[in-house]
Image (spheres, coloured by chain):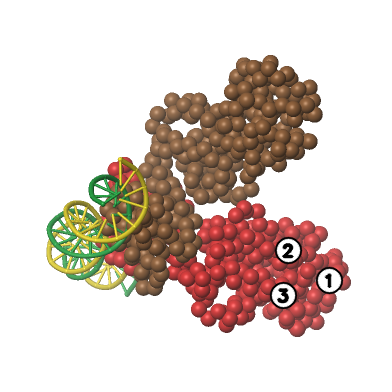
Chain colours: A brown, B red, C green, D yellow
Amino acid sequence: MSTEPSWDLYRTFAAVLREGSLSAAARALGITQPSVARHIEAFEQAVGGKLFLRSQRGLSPTDRALALQPYAEELVAASAAMLRTASADPEDIAGTVRISASEIVATEHLPPMLAAIRRQYPKLSIELVASDAVDDLLQRRADIAIRMVDPVQQALVARRIGTVQLGLYAHRDYLDRRGRPQSIAELPGHDLIGVDRNSSLSRAISGALPGIEHGDFTLRTDNTVVHLAAIRAGFGIGICQTRIAARDMALVSVLPDAFAFGLPLWIVMHEDLRSSARCRTVFNALAVDLRDVVNT
Amino acid sequence: MSTEPSWDLYRTFAAVLREGSLSAAARALGITQPSVARHIEAFEQAVGGKLFLRSQRGLSPTDRALALQPYAEELVAASAAMLRTASADPEDIAGTVRISASEIVATEHLPPMLAAIRRQYPKLSIELVASDAVDDLLQRRADIAIRMVDPVQQALVARRIGTVQLGLYAHRDYLDRRGRPQSIAELPGHDLIGVDRNSSLSRAISGALPGIEHGDFTLRTDNTVVHLAAIRAGFGIGICQTRIAARDMALVSVLPDAFAFGLPLWIVMHEDLRSSARCRTVFNALAVDLRDVVNT
DNA sequence: CCGTGCTCATCTATTTTCGTATAGTGAATA
DNA sequence: TATTCACTATACGAAAATAGATGAGCACGG
């Protein structure tokens, strides 16, 4: 190993890995395809091994290249975050803030809050990542995250907003048509909207709904937005945040005394960003606004 | 923002931030000072603001540059880790593995183990980071970490080796000279070696040594290697792992029944590295060898 | 069956970047 | 006060990377 390769090779490598071909990576990076080819060639020579198998339909990564994928993604995220931070005056409330939140929070709660924040700080721009990945902050994919699990990381500034209350809800039309269940025991006869798998909600729900099996759900989806849309469409009985349901006159609470549980709501920021005025401002503003989402 | 700046600017920026001057950064990077100056200039133009105040004694970072420091360090660590991984054949047990461990473990336990591993895999090279920072793995500063606290991170492969037993020890010469304490109550009359501050051990020790105050320690150091050296030099009574003390005939256990506590020993690796043969191999080999360090 | 659209590879002219050499400036030292 | 030393800034020729154009191979669809 004589000298370290140019970091631009890393950027090109990441793009090729993501796009799947030299040409596509070139388009994404705004450079030409021969340059991309040279970069990959140089990187392969630097590490002493092939990274891609060339074919007429693109490049397929070797095991060696796949092993680099997490690093490549980390570099892309960190460099983007760095450029974003660098491009903003640290004293001024301007520049871009990336916020990560669950899909439901991002679609149902955040838009009016963000609109209000932007009205107050017109030079601010917001990027909203609708994702449930808990490690967004560490991966530098977001500046601020809104989470519904207790944070375990160090080096984070976390503030607990309160508890988001959830309950069973259905559209009034559905209940008029099918009747209102009087106990949990009657639920299996109804059209139930439930979670599929891979959802952190799964365990919480099965704990709160004794006797209801995976197969009892008539519609199963891990997409919470779809879940909510199904309730609103009168498909059946599903789980919904009480504060969201309260906004919609057509939604009626089902068995509010028998089924209820809460999730913690946190707003979290990386420690390093405390010195950034724009991140601090958005963090504090959201922390206030989000109080409308919780019940306690 | 027209086009993203070259990632090489980031590398140069990180070097200037670390070294404190254009010339020093140039030496560290193996390029020339005018190139470094050009890079910084280009970066400043790209972000639209000054990053350093030039002076005859070097460059001092502005607030804006300081805000970028964590990102810069992350980029440096991730790119180094990526290059390290890329330079090794994933099938072969070769290349470099970075191991992070506490100073005591790194000095007292690991050397013979690593020597044995290297005898078995001659193409392997080892980098050993003696540090107690728990986030080494997330920062990509190390591939494998040996920790004495329970891991809280997700996305880690962690294996609990057992419990490291600690006790009070002193050199035989010291005890011959000053006598052997028969109870904890007699300890304040002795020369005690203790921890200073900022040590995770502090709380554990004060819990196990009731009645002993910070001021009762005659020698206070947070450096565990110094602590051990002081015991061996006959300075007084200090805390030592029983397995380390057992190797040294001159060290005698003090109040073994009255004072004893254990710390968990973990070996931890990032999930992504499971597919790397060399990391997996070293991980497993260390997991076996480290069993000699624990008592249970 | 042949065109169309995609890909990667190769060659050359041009632009960009880099290194060398040198000048200039302030602070510490004798 | 003169000198040395480390630093930054500037100018210019050399080297390197880039863009552009072109050719060839493979898959898909009419």
Q: Residue at x 47, y 53 (%)?
A: A74
Q: Secondary structure at mark 1?
A: loop
Q: Is residue B23 visible?
A: no
Q: Is residue B138 left or right of residue B82?
A: right
- Label 3 to label 1: alpha-carbon separation: 23 Å
Residue A71 locus on image (x, y percent): 47, 57
On the image, numbered disc 2 is attached to which residue? B263
Total numbered badges shown on the rendered structure: 3
From what the image shows, is residue A270 above or below residue B184? above
Crowd band around label 1 with a 10 angstrom C-alpha radius: few (<14), some (14–19), many (20+): some
On the image, numbered disc 1 is attached to which residue? B255
- Label 1 to label 2: alpha-carbon separation: 19 Å
Badge 3: chain ID? B
Q: Residue at x 67, y 32 (%)?
A: A218
Q: Residue at x 57, y 49 (%)?
A: A155
Crowd band around label 2 with a 10 angstrom C-alpha radius: few (<14), some (14–19), many (20+): some
Q: Secondary structure at mark 3?
A: helix
Q: Residue at x 79, y 61 (%)?
A: B208
Three-letter code, disc 1: Leu
* 1 and 2 marks in contact (CB < 8 Å): no
**Nearest to the observer: residue B277 or residue C27:** B277
From what the image shows, is residue D6 above or below residue B116? above
Crowd band around label 3 with a 10 angstrom C-alpha radius: few (<14), some (14–19), many (20+): some
